Amino acid sequence: MTTILKSPAALRVAGAILTIAVLAGAVALMRGNDAQSSETAPAKARPAAAAPAATPTSAAPVAASRAPAIATLGAVQVDRDELLRQLQALPPQSLAQLKDNRAGLDQWLRARLAEKALIEQARAQGWQDKPELQRAFQAAQERILLQSYLESVSRAPDDYPGQADLQAAYERAKPQLAQPAMYRISQIFLPAALGDAEAVAAARKQALDLVKRAQAPKGDFAALARDFSQDSTTRGQGGDIGYAPLAQLTPEMRPAVEQLKAGEVSAPVQSAAGFHILKLADVRPAGVTPFEQVKEELRVALRTQRQELAARAYLEGLLNAGTVSIDGAALNAAFEQTAAAPAAKPAVARAP
């Protein structure tokens, strides 16, 4: 097929939505996946002495208080509650696919058991007490705490945006939501390279004959396309390309399509690839994407914008509530110490 897809309507609508939601500061603070597994959440690290190698005997009292096990590997298990949390986090379509994919679900359970067994091994060796991991645990805990709390204090009201806000945002976005005229076209394509005079002559002759047959009172363009078109993409649909704006058509096609009325068949149009016989099935005039089609996207964009602005204002309020003091000398010393650290490391001798 010789149409060129440059800017689908969906991308244009998405771009318009993004122009409404001005991305303010604190985006990174308010986004992210807070979902944590039962074993990997940055909880308080256990002391090394309290984490002996797991045994069935020592694990028995803990297991008694857990939900029923779905899968086990020695002393570790994936219980019903953990599995339910994982399944409930899936989109409906993925959940439906997984329901019919027992092998995939079994594979996930086996991988999760291996992860949990590895975690228990690390804990038994006091791995969680390493200073670098303690710092990482603390940083993760602070990040989750910050994200959750900032989201709670900056959340947009449940009734925002109202209908008036949505309508006003739609009016502002109309220039970006404009849709060009859309043409539904069918084609019969006959390949003929420009440099092959014999092929061009033969294809032109055949194209003229097919135009006569298609323009005849009882001409069946779709049947002719299925029988003669060499465009494998559209031949099975009777040559139907679907709706497309002029900008997505090849330059040779555009003037021919503009001159057609619905139901008319064009004269052969020659391009570098060959000859195209075009039929215009329908025209959708230029307009603006209807409000109902973008209302929910507008709602999400406005709520996101409101929350981001509120988060930034909250953070600025914390700074303005007190006096900020920065020790410039200490700051410079820290930079100098950091820059000097690599030079202080002993050079590693290399073998000749």
Image (spheres, helix red, strand yellow):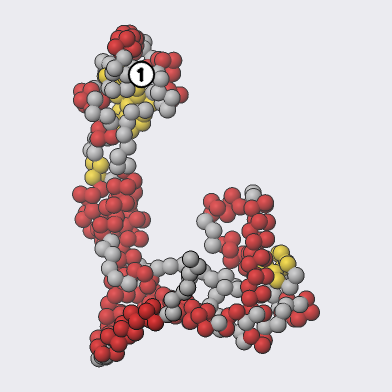
Residue occupying image coordinates x 58% and y 80%: 128
Q: Residue at x 39, y 82 (%)?
A: 344
Image position of 335 (left or right of 68)? left
- Coordinates of residue 113 in the picture (x, y in percent): 67, 65
Callout 1: 10 Å neighbours few (<14), some, many (20+)? many
Indicate whether 97 appears above or below 279.
below
Give the image quarter of residue 302. Answer: bottom left
Query: Which quadrant of the structure image shows residue 84?
Result: bottom right
Is 47 displayed left or right of 175 in the figure? Answer: right
- Is residue 229 or residue 196 the one in the foreground? 196
Whether residue 47 sits left or right of residue 333 in the image: it is: right
Residue 175: x and y in percent read 20, 49
Q: Is residue 49 above or below residue 179?
A: below
Mark 1 — residue? Answer: 191
Q: Residue furthest right?
A: 57
Amino acid on which disc 1 is placed:
Pro
Q: Residue at x 27, y 77 (%)?
A: 313
Query: Can residue 223 be seen from the camera position used here?
Result: no
Q: Secondary structure at mark 1?
A: strand
- Image position, residue 257 (x, y; %): 24, 25
Q: In the picture shown, does residue 350 fall above or below 250? A: below
- Which residue is more in the foreground, 16 or 352? 352
Of residues 90 and 299, the one drawn nearer to the viewer in this rendering = 90
- The quarter of the rendered structure image containing the N terminus is top left
Q: Is residue 180 above or below residue 275?
A: below
Q: Position of residue 352 (x, y in %)?
A: 48, 66
Relative to 36, 8 lies left or right: left
- Camera sees residue 297: yes
